Image (cartoon, rainbow, N blue to C red):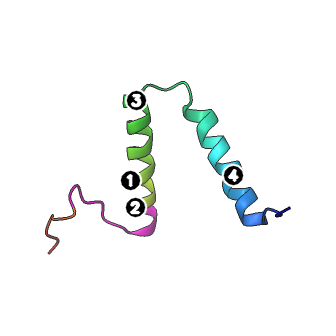
Amino acid sequence: MKTISKIEQEVDQIRLAIYEEIKDMTQAQRAEYYRKSGEATAKKYGFKIIANAKEKTI
């Protein structure tokens, strides 16, 4: 039997916490939740979010 590493356990806990937070949301509410989360993460780490992979960044 395979044992689950501490990292896998942590990822599973995070995944479950997110599921519990969004399980009763509509599809539109979930999209907004992930959009805001993505924007906050991008701002925190200095990433730029682009809408399209073909979008030129100069």
- Left or right of 11 in this view: 34: left
Pair 2/3: label in front: 3
In front of the other: 1 or 57: 1
Residue, disc 1: 39
Residue 14 drawn above or below residue 54: above
Q: Marks 3 and 2: in contact by CB < 8 Å?
A: no
Pair 4/2: label in front: 4
Q: Marks 4 and 1: in contact by CB < 8 Å?
A: no
The answer to if 29 sits in the magenta stretch is no
- The residue at the far bottom in this view is 58
Residue, disc 4: 12
Which type of secondary structure does the marked residue at label 1 adopt?
helix
Q: Within the image, what quadrant is residue 7 found in?
A: bottom right
Q: Earlier in the sequence, mark 3 or mark 1?
A: 3
In front of the other: 14 or 8: 8
Q: Earlier in the sequence, mark 4 or mark 3?
A: 4
Mark 3 and mark 1: Cα distance apart in space = 18 Å
In front of the other: 7 or 38: 7
Q: Within the image, what quadrant is residue 50 found in?
A: bottom left
Which type of secondary structure does the marked residue at label 2 adopt?
helix
Mark 4 and mark 3: Cα distance apart in space = 22 Å
Residue, disc 3: 27
- Which span is picked out in magenta? 42-52
Residue, disc 2: 42
